[in-house]
Amino acid sequence: MKDISLCIMTRELCHEFYKGFENDPAIFMDTSTLLPYEYSEQKVNEYFDARQQDSSRILFAVMKGEKPIGELQLKNIDDHEKECSLSIHLQNDTVKGKGYGTCAERLALQYAFDVLGVRAVNADTVTKNTRSQHILEKIGFQFVREENDFKYYRYIR
């Protein structure tokens, strides 16, 4: 997808992303805990600041043209073990199911291997999030195990 890219998340992009964000029931094992997302400038600032202070994490905006449609993180970056973990959240249903997340995850893998120099990237999903599991498997992640309410995956280059 030519119009999908990753860029380092800025405070402004973070606000733009979260102004249109909607919680996804597929990422909650217990949907009774699911509440509608309500944008708060203060909470987004606190979230962004906390992520910026974590040196084992890189926060990216998934961009469709000039608009942030997702948030992708490479986290738990371990220079000694040469691995990290990937997580992604797309903004809302208007951008899901179009291949944008798949493209963003492929770009993140390229960055993790070529820029960070890792040898493995890990990911996990709640067991009921079959859409995410399908994407991970489609781009080459291998299923590792299922434990409690999660499925764990690993991509080794």
Image (spheres, helix red, strand yellow):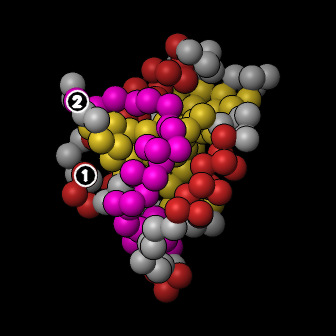
Q: Which residue corresponds to the image point at 43% horizontal and 43% vertical from the top-left?
A: 13
Which of marks 2 and 1 precedes in the sequence? 2
Considering only vertical position in the picture, is 72 above or below 77? Answer: below
The residue that label 2 is drawn on is 3
Residue type marked 1: Val
Quarter the N terminus occupies: top left
Q: Which residue corresponds to the image point at 52% horizontal and 13% vertical from the top-left?
A: 114
Badge 1 element = helix
The tag on residue 62 is: none
Image spot of residue 22 (x, y percent) = 37, 66
Mark 1 is surrounded, within 10 Å at the Cα level, by few (under 14), some (14 to 19) or many (20 or more) other residues, namely: some
Q: Is residue 16 magenta?
A: yes
Badge 2 element = loop
Q: Compare residues 85 and 13 and report the one nearer the observer.
A: 13
Q: Compare residues 130 and 143 and report the one nearer the observer.
A: 130
- The segment highlighted magenta reads 3-29
The residue that label 1 is drawn on is 95
| Residue 79 falls in image quadrant | top right
Left or right of residue 13, residue 124 in this image: right
Residue type marked 2: Asp
Q: Which residue corresponds to the image point at 50% horizontal and 55% vertical from the top-left?
A: 125
Mark 2 is surrounded, within 10 Å at the Cα level, by few (under 14), some (14 to 19) or many (20 or more) other residues, namely: few
Left or right of residue 119, residue 63 in this image: left
Image spot of residue 76 (x, y percent) = 69, 38
